[in-house]
Image (cartoon, rainbow, N blue to C red):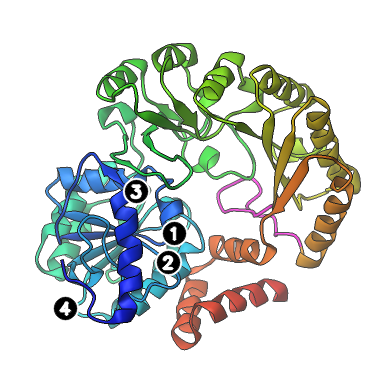
Amino acid sequence: MRRPRRPEDYKDYRVVEDYSRKEIDLNPSQGLSLALFFPSSYRVASSSLSFSWVRDLFYAHGVGVERFFFQDFFSRFYSLESLRPVDEFRSIAFSYNFETDLINIMETLRKIGIPLRWKDRNSNHPLIFVGGAMTYFNPSTVYPIADFIYLGDLEVGIEKISEAILEREKERSISVLEDLPFVTIPRTGKSGTVAKARDLNELPPVGSVITPEGEFKSKILIEVGRGCIRRCAFCMIGHLQKPARFLRIDTMKKILSRIPKDVSLGLISATITDYPWMDELLDLLEGRNFSVSSMRMDRLNLRLLKMLRNSGQRSFTVAPEGGTQKVRDILKKDINHHHIENALMIGREAGFDNLKMYFIYGVPGESEEDLRGIASISKMASDMGYKTVKLSLNPLIPKPGTPLGSVKMENIKILKEKKEFILNILKKLKGVKVHFEGLKESVVQYEIANSSLDDAEEYVDVFEKFGPGELKRFIYRKFGRK
């Protein structure tokens, strides 16, 4: 461990040290082979199962791994495992899960003095590679940056990737990967295909770090399902990660037998209510505290909600997405008003006083009547007795590979007008609180998600000349010119 030499670096060091001390690490690993970097805040990174599971996958294959996260004010980066600085590591893997992570990846490399472009780096620079959710549908955004890009589910290619990382020379690492079909290598022109794990039960995804931060506070995370059986027109999971795969009940029994009953669980799935053996799963969870990542309104049941309530959950979250049936049909949500009403009633019967609902606006063909439907559903919830109804409203961000992928994101001026209209009709409702995702941030997400290789090259050019703030403004202005 090399402590900071400059006084200004101590702030970064202390922040990481504080998070590290709060963690309970059930599978501690250390080593200088690989810096596993999450280009987002600790809170966001620790909400993901990959935060510890990817580390454990590499560690099981002989790769010494330590985790890093991003903060805007960091000038140095230190690992959570040993507080070593990132410049001591031979390889850096970025877990690229959100569009705006791209900007943080570039900022990280800039701050640690590594050229952004792979073609500007030499054999003395660390091996830089990228994986994560964004590689499933648009890896070209990091094509100018990465020495190689791993596409899809890591467990499929972990042996070969580990072999490459353990090589002492960068060129040898790259050559090891030439025969791996799930890798794109910009310098050689090799293109890869997306890896998909056929069976989650062969290597069950279970976390090993418990932290009081993030969406799943003080919980061990278990991925009970990957992919989705649904067809929502705006969602990549249901279209790019088919078929849906689930942990079998016998696998869950084995996992839970190793976890003490007083340890809380976080169950990860596109929607837990589509788990094929729900009754048996709830039998296994009796007497345990747990939370879930997502639930379908048409598949909610009273027993599940009561168990969540008894686990200490004070609010439950659902996603009508559209205020009217017309919008829900455009979004291919496959739920109707009866499903929504019934789900809200079950929530009240289970003892919930607080509700959170997600809606999408800026949908093609949307009218004022459709927007009023958001208020109608919110009023229905209030009338049922919910003390607080929190709404999260997001503009439609069309993503490649989805049925709405060819639709252009709605004009910012119109989205602002719709936002004001929604606020005006909601302000009369008691107990209803609303949060809108920032429109500028949404535009940046849309542009990066739909970027071409030429766009990616342009992003690096702008970043190298002007930095992250100007790059975001450049992307926003680019959308306005279309």
Seen in the image, is 341 located left or right of residue 475? Answer: right
Instruction: Check the picture and name the quadrant holding the N terminus.
Output: bottom left
**Mark closer to the chain start, 1 or 2:** 1
**Mark closer to the chain start, 4 or 1:** 1
Give the extent of the magenta segment.
395-410
Q: Label 4 amino acid?
A: Asn
Q: Label 1 amino acid?
A: Ser
**Mark closer to the chain start, 4 or 3:** 3
Q: Label 2 amino acid?
A: Gln
Local SS, label 3: helix
Question: Which numbered mark, 4 or 1, is in the foreground of this view?
Answer: 1
Residue 384 pos. (x, y %): 80, 24
Identify the residue position indicated by label 1 in the image.
41
Is residue 422 visible in the rendered image? The answer is yes
**Mark closer to the chain start, 3 or 2:** 3
At a point 39% along the width and 52% down the height, the residue shown is 132
Q: Vertically, is 466 above or below 95?
A: below
Residue 455 pos. (x, y %): 52, 73
Q: Which quarter of the figure has residue 116?
A: bottom left
Q: Are marks 1 and 2 in contact (CB under 8 Å)?
A: yes
Quote the CA–CA distance across marks 4 and 3: 28 Å
**Mark closer to the chain start, 3 or 1:** 1
Residue 195 pos. (x, y %): 34, 44
Quote the CA–CA distance across marks 3 and 2: 16 Å
Local SS, label 4: loop
Is residue 115 visible in the rendered image? The answer is no
Identify the residue position indicated by label 2 in the image.
71
Please say whether residue 406 is one of the residues in the magenta stretch.
yes
